[in-house]
Amino acid sequence: MKMLPEDALDRLVDGSNEIADLCRKNKVQQWEIVALQSYGHQLDIEAGKISLAAGGGDGGYGIRVVEDGKFGYAHLVDIKSADKAIQQAISIARISPSIKGFTLPSNQETSEVKGLFDKKILSIGPEDLLQQADSILSEVSSLDKRAVVTGGGLGVSATAGVLTSSEGIEHHGITTSHGLGVQVSIDENDQLTSSWQGESSKKLIDKIPNCVANSVEWAQKTRDPIKVDNGAEDLPVLMTSEGIGSLFSIVIPSAIRGERLARMESFWSGKQGHQVLADDLTLIDNARMEGGISSSSRDGEGVPTQRQVIVESGKLVGSLWSTRDSAKLVSEGKIDKASTTGSASRGGHQSPPVTACSNLELISSSKSSSVDELLERMDSGYVVNSVMGAHTANPTSGDFSVTTSSILRVEGGEIIGAIKQAGLSGNMAKALSKEVFLSDDVRVSGGSMHIPDILLMQALRVNPI
Amino acid sequence: MVLAKSPSDDSYDKARRYLDEDKIRSALQNASDFGASYAEVRLVSITDSSVATRDGQLERAIPGQEVGATMRILADGAWGVHSTTDIESIPSQVESTVRLAKAVAQRRSSKDKPVSLAEIPIIEDSVHWAPEKDVRATELTEKLEHLNVLYENSKDDKKIASVICGWHDEHIHTEFISSEGMNRVWSFQRSLINATVTARDGSDVVSYRTRHGGEGGLELIEQCDLANLGNYAKTSAIRLLKAERSPSGKLPLVADRDLTGVYIHEALGHPCEADLVAAGDSCLDGKLGQKIGNDIVTVVDDPTIRGGYGAHPIDDEGLNTREKCLIKNGVLTDYLNHRETAHHFGIEPNAGARAQDGLHHPLVRMSNTLIMGGTHNDLDELIEDIDYGVYACGSRGGQVDTGRGSFQFAAQEAWLIENGSITTPLKDVSVSGLTLQILKDVDGLTTDSKLAAPGFCGKGQTVPVGDGGPIMRIKEALVG
């Protein structure tokens, strides 16, 4: 069974051309059409068994029109309603404020980013996924007979996409993805422990990924909690990549958007050229990473993407911009000059482009350490592998106050046991600007954050139950 | 392919059908011929409009119409599902979807029970919750006028750095046809307005979010005192600039209606979802009929509360919605369920199935979830005997580990309670605890239980929900 119809792209191109003709007929000054169509298979796992198998496809068209610096947008699934959608977009544009200097981007040459398409995924059928799920369930059971996959699933998809504009952009392609996630629980002697881990790739995941064993390991590690009577303490915390990924992805991408920086809505506003992270840390937004989950050769409005250094040796040196944001903030006088950094992103055909990060990498110029070396450096503190409530972190201030049930106590550089639950609070920006040490094992967490385990020596408070 | 059979105009037409009933019935019969014991097709058309302004200027306005359908087939006691925007293609996917279900069934071990569905009444009808004012007829200029009232009352202080206002309305039209003979069409609308106010003082930056809306049309927005909503958001954002960090530790906690709603949603509602209970991922497994909370705690989930953001007339398995009493005077009386879990537990189906849209299959979900009122007259009565505690208001969201029964939620703003009085403003207050402990620690509720601000709930799929209750006192909670 083939996942993607042979003519999937051709049909999208034909549909886009039909809408483009209608835009020309309506004498739209500038227009841009995005067409997306995804196909895929997925399995749900519950209570140690496959509970459901699903397949299908969805997609649609988005139309952006720009006239005299004003823009309108509309989306649709039925090509027959395209003319109405164009009229809606035009009428919205006409009552929108004009942004001086805002025009749709012109076509620029760029090279493809490798590793975003794997032909092998196209031939994956439901039976292949079922066999992979069987293997995962067996693997979990073989690692620990008590362990059960209580939730999760796996899926493959292929997405055909077309971007066409009045400015000569004609970009199309197919990307693939394969992902899985498992929640492993051990429920024995009236004590339930669990751990969620997952992995995504643009390529076929043809072996059982490490996240499965890690999930079992953390369900084991957090059993038989010890009692800690110290109350709330400001101590070093080693956040695993999985533990910090969700918080990092809520707080940092928002802070490096040019618009938020220029509007003084970021905790790093006014700090361009100043120290914002520990001086050995560098933060890179890399949309051209081979095989990166958020990689692409062109951004959501067709501008060539780039690898951009945002923080270099602790100093804020960059920010993310889309065409519209940059024109708008310059026209408002919030910033002297700005131009697109190829950082426009779309949530699908229903959304116009907005500025967003791609793959964020945090690296250190200092020698990275093993986890054992980091524990030794920590001496006393905690290891945290997941947090609950990361989405309640405040991206404007960087403050967060979350809960964890996946936390280990460290004394004298050794893990002495798990604790049942603890509150964890602090400020992400401050914690990353103090003493910070990175492990040598970079993993992808929080969507597309490429970060290792991070030892934060200051600015965090742990409050064990 | 990206095609959906859609009507030629958008006018409100009760007789309009997207699905070709004869073709779908024939497809469902084919499913039976291929060995399915049950099959259904559910189509959802959503006509929506989103508007955002920044500092009073239109940022974006996005109208759209999306149509999607999901076919669920039960064969040999397992589910196969096909979801698509290509409505015409559904009949051609029947055989492969039956095969999918059978392939899942083959993997079932002897100790696992095959999926069966609880019996339900078979209904053929159309149900339309008509709004007083159809929101689809609202011009963009009128939406902008409402947003401007919110903005004008949020902005007038030099410490306000920005005000982002938003609008979202949607008309949801659903068609449901099953192999059992169910043939229903229903529709309703939701309308929402919101603002996020950011304040800045030197390097301190804070934000406050406010929302109003629910099930219904333009009347919901017109009935709201938007000036007051905006003014409160501004005042709160400025107050947060001077707020102090929260004390950490186990403290008496008083929660306003918003936070009470989020608490009951996270701490009790999710563990009550029968699909999680059946999967062994709920701390309430085996506790039906047991005392799990203080006598004063009674909790309902009720999708029939018109105007609530989680209100809907019919669930996504075609059942008429109804009130579910989850806890009565501290005793766990019911799980939220769908047909599969109702059969699994041998309990009455209570119409708890919801899907995000036409492209997702239904899960057990909450709707409008409330703690019922108690005996305290007001906030003053609840705090008068607290020496040192926290009064927390407004929600920034929450999360629960249903299996362990631990939860966390965060407040937008808070105050210290000292010697029975509200004193110092606090910021970044979060509360965590264990469901089975904290339900026993609820020791005070005001008399007036109402739904609070609208919210959204994520469980792989996102659905709108209403939460609320009275003002609530917990004698001890972990505050951080």
Image (cartoon, coloured by chain):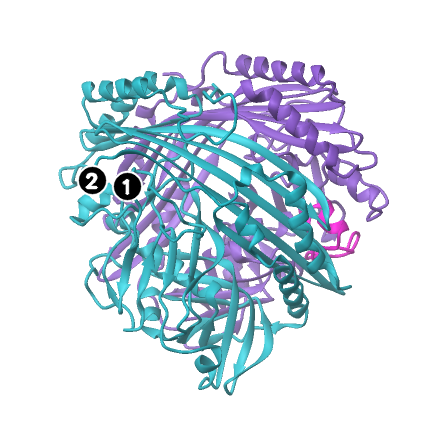
| Residue B323, x across and y down, in percent | 30, 54
Whether residue B141 is situated above or below residue B250 in the rendered picture? above
Q: Secondary structure at mark 1?
A: loop
- Check disc 1: other Cα within 10 Å, few if <14, some if 14-19, many if 20+: many
| Residue B423, x across and y down, in percent | 58, 81
The chain ID associated with circle 1 is B
Q: CA separation, marks 2 and 1?
A: 8 Å
Q: Is residue B83 inside the magenta stretch? A: no
The image's mark for residue B319 is 1
Q: Secondary structure at mark 2?
A: loop
Q: Are marks 2 and 1 on the same chain?
A: yes
Classify the position of the C terminus of chain A by image quarter: bottom left
The one of B136 and A157 positioned closer to us in this rendering: B136
The residue at the point 45 percent across, 20 percent down is B5
* Tint of chain A: purple
- Quarter residue A187 falls in: bottom left
Which amino acid type is shown beneath numbered disc 1? Answer: Leu
Magenta stretch prevailing secondary structure: loop
| Residue B63, x across and y down, in percent | 59, 34
Look at the image and tell me whether residue B203 can be seen: no
Look at the image and tell me whether residue B15 can be seen: yes
Residue assigned mark 2: B120
Residue segment shown in magenta: A255-283
